[in-house]
Amino acid sequence: MSLRQKTHDLKKRMQVALQGGGSKAVEKQKATGKLTARERIVSILDPDSFHEYDIFVQHAGKDFDMDKKYLPGDGVVTGTGTINGYPVCIYAQDFTVAGGSLGYMHAKKICKIMDHAMKLKVPIIGINDSGGARIQEGVNALAGYGDIFYRNTQASGVIPQISVILGPCAGGAVYSPALTDFVFVVDKISKMFITGPEVIKTVLGEEINQEELGGARVHAEISGNAHFFAESEAECFEQIKSLVSYVPWNNAKTAESFPPKSPKSREYRISSIIPTDPSIPYDVRDIIRSIADGSEFLEVSELFAKNIVVGFARINGDTVGFVANQPLYMAGVLDCDSSDKAARFVRYCDSFNIPMVTLVDLPGYLPGVDQEHAGVIRHGAKLLYAFSEATVPKITITLRKAYGGGYIAMCSHHLKADFVFAWPTAEIAVMGPEGAANIIFRNEIMNAENPEEMRQEKIQEYKEKFANPYVAAAYGYVDAVIQPNETRDYIIHALKVGKNKQEKGPDKKHGIPPF
Amino acid sequence: MSETKKVYRKVYITVDEGFIYPFIPGTVLDIHVKKGDKIEIGDKLYVLEAMKMKNEVLSPVEGTVKNINVKVGQRVSKNEVILEIG
């Protein structure tokens, strides 16, 4: 054969492989509002940057007449490309080929591109759209999942791992996304569960549909498994591109710098966001936007545990991670879910050299039987652990309330925050004035002629004496009391002088966080 | 079995968004609407004081106020329906 003939032969082979599951299967995929695997990859990556590998890989099934079947690329598309010029490794399961089911070679391909990402030290993006294990391949399918989970764990904290759920992701398959850093879901398209509605009906007699059991909304709002929720695949891809711009390629680098931008100070006036009455809520995201470059803020887990806000922004061109209590929702209390959400985010930032800014305004941990029995002790401990363990520059700003255990947990001086600032509106004390007065002045109140009057008097007394930032400042627990409009300047300065921060804990294999 | 199922669905799935539950136990400080009022999404419904915060509760749905099950000053638990909008 001449080179021309050989080239022609290659093109023919490519053509067959690129058809995926064939036009009928592709049509079916599109009818449900879904793109095909290759279209998805191309939509996420920079134009013409996708290079596909292992397109001629064949499945390894021998039983049940599988050896007579041809599955193009064994149902998964893998390769490399760039996002805004950033290199990434990427794979997408192809639902049109045998339902995107995971067989031995399918898993091998995924493992290969993951190993590639680890060697090149670049992010890995996985697009999940699969019916699950390819049952015909038996234990080899399970082996495939295990190999992927192991790699997910090894890569954790080394390279950013992003999972995109664009179809069903059921059974063992869900644990790969769960082990990665960020999970993206799309309304009505993503479905994640360990056991589906059929099994639940058979075993428990409970009837529920896929959407209510494990749809995108469920995971974004209730279970917290998903970090980004989108209405359409196109919106989801924009979110991925935005996220990639905020994080470094790997744990040895810092995130890319962008040209600094001023916040939109006309829309977000930092001095007038906080109401004077401490019992009136406000949206803490407005404070973040009043500080961040261009007032841009990429919120992570926006719909889950809304009483704490976490996400990325830039300050003077560099990425920072924000953790902020949200007075707008449940008064901004810490509870099981919010502690869990924030702790994970703090560990992410610490792994990838992203400085942290913590904004504090909370009444404390949420009381109640529900919470105690749900394990608020061990979940709350996660946040203490994460903040204490983090060695990136840590900047804490107390905006308003900082009481009791909540004060300590929110990256206080005691958990080795590097810069602790407080607004003049800050109230840093062992507990709220009402509770404290009841305990400290118990006898005076009980023995008074008019106990209620005495109580109010003592509450007022306590408020004046302790509900301010100056008692904590007197002990050096607050480094500076600053005016709200100085906040951005203080953060910029702290980031500048904290850039070369080096801190090393005692040698250990790893700690034992309260998982 | 059916009893368990009911509780399960109540906690994890909002059957009807028009049933307004408090997101946290607290005290009803003020109610901004009356029975029969037309409600748009985002309209202020009532003030719930909880954890020393006066939370303005906004409507997640549009419709008409069908029922108000609480009075001003009443303490409410997490599973009580405050308002019904339909």
Image (cartoon, coloured by chain):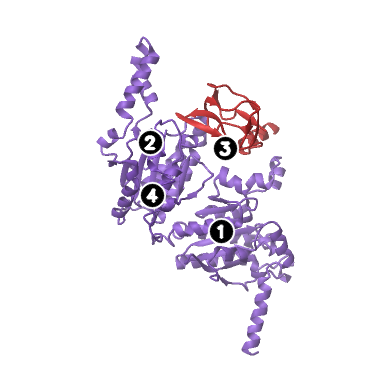
Chain colours: A purple, B red
Q: Nearer the viewer, mark 4 or mark 3?
A: 3
Q: Locate the N terminus of chain A and report the quarter of the image it occupies.
A: bottom right
Name the element at disc 1: helix
Instruction: Tell me if residue A467 comes above or below residue A44 in the rendering.
Output: above
Asked if A354 appears above or below B73 in the picture, the reply is below
Residue A238 drawn at (x, y percent): 54, 58
SS of the residue under disc 2? strand
Tags 3 and 1 in contact by the CB under 8 Å rule? Answer: no
Q: CA distance from mark 2 to mark 1?
A: 37 Å
> Which residue corresponds to mark 4?
A356
Question: Which chain letter goes with mark 1?
Answer: A
Q: Amino acid at mark 2?
A: Arg
Residue at the far bottom in the pictured view: A2
The residue drawn where x is 54% and y is 65% is A45
Q: CA distance from mark 4 to mark 2?
A: 19 Å
Q: Mark 2 or 1 closer to N-term?
A: 1
Residue tagged 3? B42
Q: What residue type is disc 4 on?
A: Met
Viewer-nearest of discs 4 and 2: 2
